[in-house]
Amino acid sequence: MVEGGLWRRWVFFYIPLTLFVFVLLFPFYWMIITTFRPDGELYKPWNAVAYQPFWTNNPTFEHILYLFEETMFSKWMFNTLLIAAVSTVISLICGVFAGYALARLNFPWAGGLGTTIFVTYLVPQTLLFIPLADIIRNFGLGDTPWALILTYPTFLIPFCTWLMMGYFKSIPKELEECARIDGASRFQAMYHIILPVAVPGIMSAGIFAFTLSWNEFIYALVFLSSPEQKTVPVGVTSELIRGDVFFWGPLMAGALLGSIPVAIVYSFFVEHYVAGLTGSVKG
Amino acid sequence: MAQVTIRQLNKVYEGAVHAVKDVNLEIPDREFVVLVGPSGCGKTTTLRMVAGLESITSGDILIGDTVVNDLAPMDRDIAMVFQNYALYPHKSVYDNMAFGLKMRKFDKAEIDKRVQHAADILGIQQLLSRRPRQLSGGQRQRVALGRAIVRNPQVFLFDEPLSNLDAKLRVHMRVELRKLHERLGTTAIYVTHDQVEAMTLGDRVVVMKDGLVQQVGDPMTLYNTPANLFVAGFIGSPAMNFANVTVVGGEGGLWVETKGLKLRLPGALASRAAPLTGKSAVFGIRPEDLRVANSADPAEYSMDCEVEVVERLGSETLLDTRVGSETIVAAVEPMVAVRAREKVRLAVTPDRMHLFDAETEKAV
Ligand SMILES: Nc1ncnc2c1ncn2[C@@H]1O[C@H](COP(=O)(O)OP(=O)(O)OP(=O)(O)O)[C@@H](O)[C@H]1O
Ligand SMILES: [Mg+2]
């Protein structure tokens, strides 16, 4: 807390905090209000009488219904969930093992390898999709979920590896050494001691990977073409923006429903998530 | 139970840190050996090589009659207590202690029997279901000990297990450790940088410095006849006083002399010091071997000092004094009537005098 008089607390704490919260939350509010606003109100000019941009007196579910009846939104949700879940699991498994190896096995060039992995994470997706598109075409995976399940790990694995490496390094080496003296093999020590202790780190890597793949846009846009294969971000923007006509109601409804799973995941694991990022193991 | 033999042990870390140099050590069965030395002298490295956690650059380590150089830690039948205890944070105290037995496929009843027995010995029965983070430092310490003793290993290895405890608890646990050793009789190697711990716990003490063993011996041998200047200064608290002196002959004997101080070397020491006549040497005397002189003390075993500070500790009083250009600390009787900036005459106990070669630093 800020020390001192009341005005200091207002100037240095409450007012900045309020501004911050407002800036962060306003887009969500706008999304929600647009979702439930009837078309008649949405397309009213701003200088019309009784113009109410921040509230509606006639909430409606028509946009949500439109989403489910007139578009393949539920299929998109399913696709996104499947792709995000599978690529997250793949990336987590690889990331945990690679991160452990980089943090603990003193093999030559471990440091250099770690840096290389990190550099691959820095290659922008907007460049990487070109060679990847070629590969996807050669393997005949275009327009299938596999196109994304196999390409998302290209940025998720480096990310998970780095996060897990940092987390493993924060676990005292003695824990593992003690387990090895206690009679565990390297693998048993990892399974019985290190992995359970690393659960917060694994969770935060998982949540982050899940969110990244849930929100991913470029690969999904490039590698998928038929409407029934699309993911939520691509489906919503490509099917609900026709030419220069924006179907604001369904668009926002799609965005709202699409962000619910991520919100749920975050709110469930937020404590672990924070612990994972700040990485602390207390004996 | 087993003896441990260390032969010509060397460790060079990559980056060419020569951490342990030609260490030789025979530890008989049931002995409690303490490795002591200043920070960075290679104690932990030596211990970790015995445990199998660090590779051996050259030399041999034997447990019993087996060369264990290439055995994995789990196959050496040892138990180690780490400085930070390394308790498994996600396991209960019971499971912490049982883990080693489970890994070694003991049956449930036997595991339970052993864990209960160890908990009994250490007085932690009521803590068995807690997690490590719900324990105090001393309790964690006990659990770490318990985890070591349930396995009933050939050798215990301790790496500064008491250094995270507060002073009072440390003294208490020191006694407990000693009792535990009397009771179990397991061969133990204990690493510490605290010479008091080394003296009180060890059957024998190994003093190390810069990767080299300086002296091995039982505590009183180290105290009474330190092999060199380093051991003399390291063992004992308050530390031994040193003065740079010249050995001179005269009046039918040998003397050590420096500004403000001239003392006769007693018989045996004088004959050993004969080759040093005319050369410089380091004279040593422990604070507790000095006392305030009375008129009966001969001049050849006393010196005039100027008191700088008087520290009254209750059980004794420390006089920080100046003799010529040297500082001499004397531990004298508590009620001594001396004040700062006064002159006092101190008497040395002749047969407690030490002399070291100034070049080799070896005891004469
Ligand atoms: N993994 C390592 N790589 C390189 N050098 C090391 C490594 N571990 C220790 N050293 C070096 O080896 C020397 C001995 O270290 P060691 O840990 O054995 O000291 P110690 O006697 O246990 O000291 P302390 O009382 O501080 O624990 C030190 O100079 C240290 O810097
Ligand atoms: Mg150490």
Image (cartoon, rainbow, N blue to C red):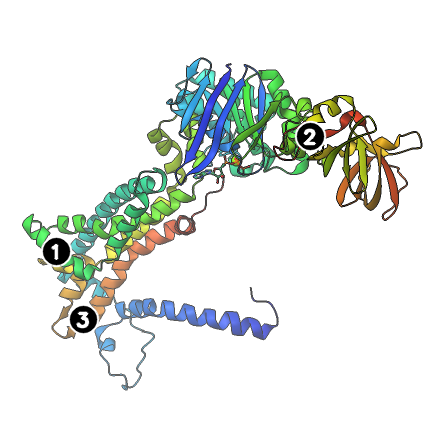
Circle 1 sits on which residue?
A131
Report whether A12 appears left or right of B327: left
- Nearest to N terminus: mark 3 or mark 1: 1
Point out the frontmost of discs 2 and 3: 2
> Could you say which is closer to the camera, residue B86 or residue B274?
B274
Q: Quadrant of residue A29?
A: bottom left
The yes-or-no answer for disc 1 within 8 Å of ligand 1 is no
Locate residue B92, reporting x and y percent: 48, 31
Amino acid, disc 2: Leu
Point out the frontmost of discs 3 and 1: 1
Amino acid, disc 3: Phe
Q: Which chain carries label 2?
A: B
Mark 3 to mark 1: distance in Å? 34 Å
| Picture quarter with the N terminus of chain A | bottom right
| Disc marking residue B276 | 2
- Disc 2 and disc 3 on one polypeptide chain: no
| Vertical comparison of A263 with A272: above or below | below
Amino acid, disc 1: Pro
| Disc marking residue A247 | 3
Q: Residue at x 79, y 37 (%)?
A: B330
Q: Quadrant of residue B162?
A: top right
- Disc 3 and disc 1 on one polypeptide chain: yes
> Could you say which is closer to the camera, residue A259 or residue A225?
A225
> Could you say which is closer to the camera, residue B52 or residue B97?
B52
Figure disc tally:
3
Graded by Cα atoms within 10 Å as few (under 14), some (14 to 19) or many (20 or more), the crowding at tag 2 reads some
| Vertical comparison of A234 with A203: above or below | below
Q: Is mark 3 on a helix, strand or loop?
A: loop
